[in-house]
Amino acid sequence: MRSLVLALFLIATPAFAEDRATVRKAQIDELLEALKKAQVETEAVVLESHLRQLWLEAGSPAVTLLMARGLRDLKAGSNAEAEQDFGDAITLDPNVAEAYDQRAIARFQQGKIAGAVGDLEETLKREPRDFFAFRHLSEIAEARRDWAAALAAWQKLLEIDPKTPGGEDKLKELRRRALGEST
């Protein structure tokens, strides 16, 4: 009997994981659609938070654990350790877009600009609607005083998340810096 239960578990596990991924994708699609329709910034913040959580938990339990550890390391300012944790998560599951996004943050905070940009490109290959990745690209471009690139990334963010907190003010500032337009 025990063997039968184990066999059924092993057979059902891939199907369960597949169903879980399908449900997660549907939730993400719904939240992204709601984000585009958000009326106020406070609504957008709540939706952004839910999306971030779904993206952070997109991998297996081991990947999710590594992601949580990496986030703790980031918060503690242990950027090299965070980079390693997110790298380990990527090794276990290279399809988890948020692992690349978070590793980009750790790399950027260490001054590893090329690595951070490369990770953000990987994020967007896996999830082209990841507005956080566009935010991070904009921040990196700003730090480099590449106002045109910062503006372009911010505009992409606003296409996905039109009510991001401070979004319109930031757009005006970046437009002024990039194009010389008055605010």
Image (cartoon, rainbow, N blue to C red):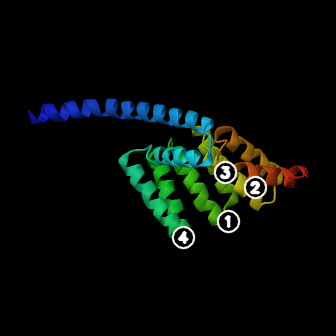
Task: Determine which residue is flagged by label 2.
Answer: 141
Determine the CA span between mark 1 and mark 4: 13 Å
Report the residue marked by disc 3: 135
Instruction: Locate residue 91, reporting x and y percent.
Output: 48, 49
User: Circle 1 is placed at which residue position?
Assistant: 111
Amino acid at the residue labelled 1: Gly
Whether residue 36 is situated above or below residue 163 in the rendered picture: above
- Answer yes or no: do the residues labelled 2 and 3 have beta carbons within 8 Å? no
Label 1 or label 4, whichever lies nearer to me, is 4
Measure the C-alpha gap from mark 3 to mark 4. Answer: 20 Å
Q: Position of residue 175 (x, y in %)?
A: 83, 49
Disc 2 residue type? Answer: Ala
Point 74% across, 43% down: residue:
155
Q: Badges 3 and 4: C-beta atoms under 8 Å apart? A: no
Identity, as a three-letter code, of the amino acid under mark 4:
Gly
Sequence-earlier tag: 3 or 4? 4
Nearest to N terminus: mark 2 or mark 3: 3
Q: Is residue 181 above or below residue 161?
A: below
- Location of residue 1 (image quadrant): top left
Q: Residue 22, position in %: x, y? A: 43, 30
Marks 2 and 3, Cα distance to the nearest angstrom? Answer: 10 Å
| Of callouts 1 and 4, the N-terminal one | 4
User: Which residue in the structure is indicated by mark 4?
Assistant: 77
- Cα gap from disc 4 to disc 2, whole angstroms: 22 Å
Judge from the rendering whether residue 47 lies leftward or rightward of residue 14; answer left or right: right
* Observer-nearest of 115 and 69: 69
Indicate left or right for 51 with 145 as reference.
left
Q: Are marks 1 and 4 in contact (CB under 8 Å)?
A: no
